Amino acid sequence: MLRGFYILFYFVIAFFIIDKEVQAACTCECVNGKKVPLCSSSLDIRPMCMGLCPLTPPSLAPLPSLGLPPLGTKQCTYMQVYDPITKRYEWENVCY
């Protein structure tokens, strides 16, 4: 029994050490004019996001998607997310 525990313990430790590049991360993005954390996994720790965002231009939101939200999320809505490369807000489907 104790040997099985040690094997499981070392497997978990090795998984977290070796699998660093696959783990998800959170980034602070401008969404609808506010800086919010966007995470690719619901298990990630959300950082405190501070700073100013450019003003959002008024526009109509796209129609909601009919697909199911990803695992770990309850709903998805289209929001304006600021793209620093194009320096414009773009509509993206954000799930939370």
Image (tube, helix red, strand yellow):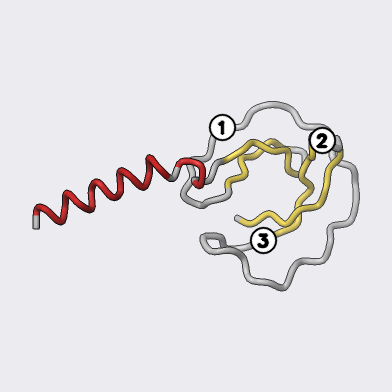
User: Sequence-wise, which precedes: disc 1 or disc 3?
Assistant: 1
Distance from label 1 to label 2 (Cα)? 23 Å
- Against 80, is 47 above or below? above
Distance from label 1 to label 3 (Cα)? 22 Å
Which residue is disc 1 drawn over?
48
Pointer 1 with pointer 2, Cβ within 8 A: no
Residue 1's x, y, as percent? 9, 58
Q: Tell me the element at label 2.
A: loop
Residue type at mark 3 is Cys
Q: Residues within 10 Å of mark 3 (few under 14, many from 20)?
A: some
Residue at image coords 76%, 44%: 81
Residue type at mark 1 is Met
Q: Tell me the element at label 3.
A: strand
Query: Which residue reaches farthest left?
Result: 1
- Against 25, is 63 above or below? below
Residue type at mark 2 is Ile
Q: Residues within 10 Å of mark 1 (few under 14, many from 20)?
A: few
Which residue is disc 2 drawn over?
85
User: Hey, which quadrant is residue 77 in on the image?
Assistant: bottom right
Q: Residue 76's mark?
A: 3
Residue 50's x, y, as percent? 64, 28
Residue 41's x, y, as percent? 53, 51
Q: Residue 64's mark?
A: none
Residue at image coords 52%, 40%: 46
